């Protein structure tokens, strides 16, 4: 199969991730698609920060990704699920929740994750965690190393009934993601998306973040601080001191096209990021 087989919207997405011939559904194809997406599409909240949060309709997300944007889990996994289904994969969406507490056992609904059945096996698939696995994991209990360490374990429900699964990772501020086994629909995420993209207490409103998972590690832009982590550990972060340096990092390190951001948008984004950074520095000095 070639790009000409697919509608323009999905062909644009495939071009963005550098896949010209995705082929028929297969384990190898699934692995290549996830890796290609993660290496080229950033996890980011730019539009939420400037007060223009995009919706989570999957086709809208596909168009945005094809145009060089990123997003967070509802956009990224929503678009990736739609692409996989267009290519003939058997995809299931699941309600998930990310946690800083390693003992957390709940499922808050603030994350969308996927499982995919292909070649007689079921795989955990997620391109919306930022620091998640570079390639799919088999949906079974076990541990794997993909630059960083990951594990899957069963998540028990009420009276010991199986509720789903827990993904654990040894990299990043959110070591746990729990998700339910039951299928979910995109409508199940609308209310939480509204809260995360508009509420003043949402972390996506409070702080700018951009992440890109590559084969050798993870790049993170947290406010004005640019971080790099790989198998050798975290590299000393670099502070971005000018708006030009900040916007260049968005484009060059993370591959985020900036043509949707006019001069006023860029100024507003830098002002918001700079004010948050100064408040963070002041809080560290007070502490």
Image: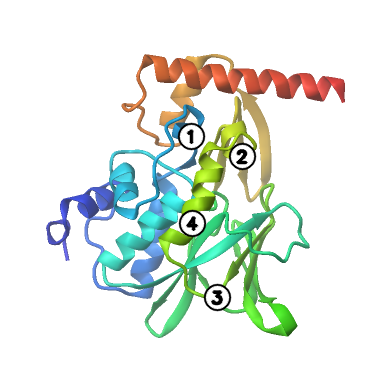
Q: What secondary structure is found at the residue carrying circle 1?
A: helix
Name the quadrant of the N terminus. bottom left
Q: CA distance from mark 1 to mark 3?
A: 30 Å
Picture disc at residue 181: 3
Taking the view exactly as shown, the residue that stands out farthest to the left is: 4
* Residue 191, image x, y percentages: 51, 52
Residue 286 falls in which quadrant of the image? top right
Q: Is residue 118 left or right of residue 126?
A: left
Q: Residues within 10 Å of mark 1 (few under 14, many from 20)?
A: some
> Front-most of 271 and 30?
271
Q: What's the residue at 44%, 43% (across, down)?
A: 71
Q: Position of residue 75 (x, y in %)?
A: 42, 50
Q: Secondary structure at mark 2?
A: loop
Q: Residue furthest front?
A: 191
Q: Which mark is residue 275?
A: none
Against 162, is 42 above or below? above
- The quadrant of the image that shows the C terminus is top right
Q: Earlier in the sequence, mark 2 or mark 3?
A: 3
Task: Answer left or right for 63 relative to 191.
Answer: left
Residue hosting label 1: 48
According to the picture, the residue beneath numbered tag 2 turns out to be 202
| Residue shown at the point (58%, 23%) measured from the top left | 273
C-alpha span from label 4 to label 1: 16 Å
- Where on the picture, by quarter, is residue 236? top right
Mark 2 and mark 4 lie on one chain; the one further toward the N terminus is: 4
Instruction: List x then y, in percent, for residue 39.
Output: 43, 48
Asked if marks 2 and 4 touch (Cβ < 8 Å), the reply is no
Residue depth check, mark 3 versus mark 4: number of the one nearer the observer: 4
Mark closer to the chain start, 1 or 2: 1
Which of label 4 and label 1 is nearer to you?
A: 4
Q: Earlier in the sequence, mark 4 or mark 1?
A: 1
Q: Which residue is mark 4?
A: 189
């Amino acid at each position: 199969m070639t790009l000409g087989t697919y509608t323009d919207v999905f062909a644009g997405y495939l071009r963005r991730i550098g896949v010209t011939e995705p082929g028929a559904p297969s384990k190898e194809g699934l692995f290549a698609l996830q890796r290609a997406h993660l290496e080229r599409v950033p996890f980011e909240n730019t539009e939420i920060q400037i007060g223009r949060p995009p919706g989570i309709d999957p086709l809208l997300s596909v168009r945005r990704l094809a145009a060089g944007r990123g997003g967070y889990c509802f956009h990224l996994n929503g678009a990736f699920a739609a692409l996989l289904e267009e290519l003939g994969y058997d995809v299931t969406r699941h309600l998930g929740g990310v946690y800083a507490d390693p003992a957390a056992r709940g499922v808050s609904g603030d994350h969308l994750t996927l499982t995919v059945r292909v070649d007689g096996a079921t795989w955990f698939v997620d391109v919306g965690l930022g620091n998640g696995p570079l390639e799919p994991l088999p949906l079974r209990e076990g541990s794997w190393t993909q630059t960083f360490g990951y594990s899957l374990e069963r998540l028990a429900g009420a009276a010991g009934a199986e509720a789903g699964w827990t993904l654990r990772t040894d990299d990043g501020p959110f070591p746990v993601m729990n998700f339910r086994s039951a299928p979910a629909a995109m409508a199940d995420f609308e209310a939480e998306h509204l809260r995360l993209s508009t509420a003043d207490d949402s972390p996506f409103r409070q702080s700018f973040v951009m992440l890109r998972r590559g084969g050798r590690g993870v790049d993170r832009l947290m406010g004005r601080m640019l971080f790099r982590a790989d198998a050798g550990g975290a590299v000393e972060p670099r502070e971005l001191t000018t708006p030009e340096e900040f916007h260049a990092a968005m484009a060059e390190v993370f591959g985020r096209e900036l043509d949707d951001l006019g001069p006023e948008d860029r100024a507003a984004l830098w002002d918001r990021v700079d004010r948050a950074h100064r408040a963070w520095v002041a809080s560290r000095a007070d502490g």
